[in-house]
Every structure is written in C-alpha cells, then in structure tokens.
Image (cartoon, helix red, strand yellow):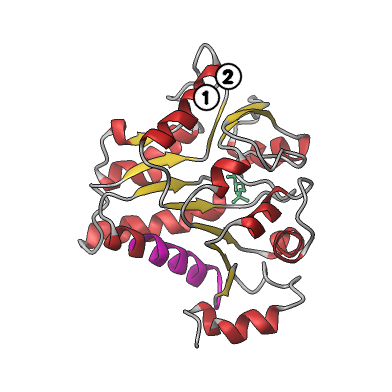
Amino acid sequence: MRVLICEDGAAAAQRTADILCASVANRPDAVLGLATGGTMEPVYAVLRNRIAAGSLDLSGVTTFNLDEYVGLAVTHPQSYRATMQRLLFDAAGLPPARCHLPDGSAADPVAEARAYEAAIEAAGGIDLQLLGIGHNGHIGFNEPTSSLGSRTRVKTLTGETRRANARFFGPDEEAPQFAITMGIKTVLETRACVLLATGPRKAAVVAAAIEGPLAAACPASALQLHPQATFVLDPAAAAGLKLRDYYETVHPGGGEARL
Ligand code: GLP
C-alpha cells in the first residue's frame, strides 16, 4: 500500500488527477473506475481544466462508476449518472455507451447488478479505480459488514450514510435507502486503485482502513489485500496515522518513493 500525504486538499486532488492522467497516458483506451462524493469534485475540476487546456484527452476511455442510487430517475440531478455527466462526461466528450453506471431505475435491480458485474468483466476489467471513503469506512456503498468477497449487488444504506448524503437532496426529499454498488471483491480485482480522503472528519476512518485490522466492519480495510492500492491524503485526513512519519519518509510531499 502506498500512503501519499500531500501538502493540502488541493494538492491531494491534483495528485489523484495526476495518477489518473498517467494511467490514460499509458493506455489511452484505459478502463477507468470512477467515484462520486464531495471529495472527488475537486479531482473532476482538475480533469475538466486539463481537458479544456488540451493537455488531457479522455475520449478513448471507458468508465464504470462504483455505484448508483436505486429508485432515482437518471434525470434526477442527484442521480450519480446526472452528477457524472455534469462533473466529467460532458467535458470529456464521452459517448453514453462508454460511460457505465448501474441503472438505478431498472425494473429488476438484482438482475441489473449482476449484468453490471458482467459488463465490467466483458470490458476486460478496470485498470484504475478511484475511491472515496464514507465516515463509517464504506467504499462505493459497501456498508460495514459487507462481505469482503462481495460483487456488484443491491445494498441497504445505513442511517449514517443516508444522513451524510441528505445534504445533496432538497428539504422535501428523502435520501435513497438502497443502492447498487460494486462489491469489495469487484474493487479488489481492479488492477490499481486510488482512495482519496481529505479533511479532519475522515482521520479516524482512514487510520482504521490503513492501520487497523482487516475487517468487514471497516470495508476500506479490504484494500490492505489489494496489490496496487494508493491512499492520497491531506494532512488533516492523515492525522490519525501512527506511522505517518514513515509514510512521509518514503513519499516526501506525497511524491514518488525515494529508493
Ligand atoms: C457516498 C459514495 C462513496 C463516497 C462517499 C463519501 O456514499 N457512494 O463512493 O466515497 O459518499 O463521500 P464524501 O466524499 O462526500 O465524503
């Protein structure tokens, strides 16, 4: 596991964008796994700026988002499909057929989840997966006690997650109770993954994920099993790490390892 502690939140978003851009430079038709959440928004802003400046071309990639709410029309502004369209797909000029999200309005969400897992496999798997982390350690919508062997499926969201996501919905709307999410095993099978966490409210869960026991109670701890996992943090999110000095010695300023 690589733990990159950057100067501040903006630097952490840049660093995450740099890793994605390097993957696309290496393989212009890369299969990218994408994530939503407030933490990711600055990353997509960096990518949009690079696209506008002509230094990034995402037109050849295929994308698979981690998750989508069940029961929300794709046209709802807070559906993850609409969010991604706004944050990246429009700017990248990506045709809808190559931007995959589970269809949360499918008549049979269980079958939709199975088909999504099969579509990832048919695309040859994911080269690079972006991840955020929930306050309870969830990745995607894999809530605590999700099986470490799980694949894309329907999950019930915890009250804590619904309260955290309520901020994106209007006062007269309820945050959805169910979602289709890639499973932990799906994420572990990606060829590389990058988890971005910023701010003091993520410090405890980041420490649990990186230095705590491997446990379904903290789904992000499963990344300890991933052969190419990178955590990109700002100092506030890194504040609970016992081995912080070590990570900063190996990756000064969150840069590449000095050998
Ligand atoms: C949602 C998403 C996750 C994301 C999490 C954290 O629950 N499904 O993929 O990591 O929120 O969001 P934020 O970055 O807003 O804290």
Tell me the SS state at disc 2.
helix
Residue 18 falls within the magenta-colored stretch: yes
Determine the residue positioned at 25% across, 54% down: 28
Q: Main secondary structure of the magenta part?
A: helix
* Figure quadrant of the N terminus: bottom right
- The residue carrying mark 2 is 110
Determine the residue positioned at 42% across, 39% down: 64
Determine the residue positioned at 53% across, 82% down: 253
Residue 67: where, in percent of width, then height? 54, 36
Residue 85: where, in percent of width, then height? 37, 38
Q: Is residue 218 above or below residue 224?
A: above
- The residue carrying mark 1 is 114
Residue 98: where, in percent of width, then height? 31, 36
Q: Is residue 101 left or right of residue 197?
A: left
At label 2, the amino acid type is Val
Mark 1 C-beta to ligand 1 under 8 Å? no
Determine the image quadrant of residue 240: bottom right
Residue 73 appearing in the image: yes
The answer to whether the residues at label 1 and label 2 have Cβ atoms under 8 Å apart is: yes
Q: Is residue 201 above or below residue 8?
A: above
Residue 82 appearing in the image: no
Tell me the tag on residue 223: none
Determine the image quadrant of residue 99: top left
Tell me the SS state at disc 1.
helix
Which span is picked out in magenta?
Answer: 7-21
What count of labels does the image hold? 2
At label 1, the amino acid type is Arg
Residue 12: where, in percent of width, then height? 51, 68
**Whole-number angstrom distance, CA of label 1 to CA of label 2:** 6 Å
Determine the residue positioned at 48% across, 79% down: 255
The residue nearer to you, when weighing 231 against 223, is 223
The residue nearer to you, when weighing 114 against 101, is 114
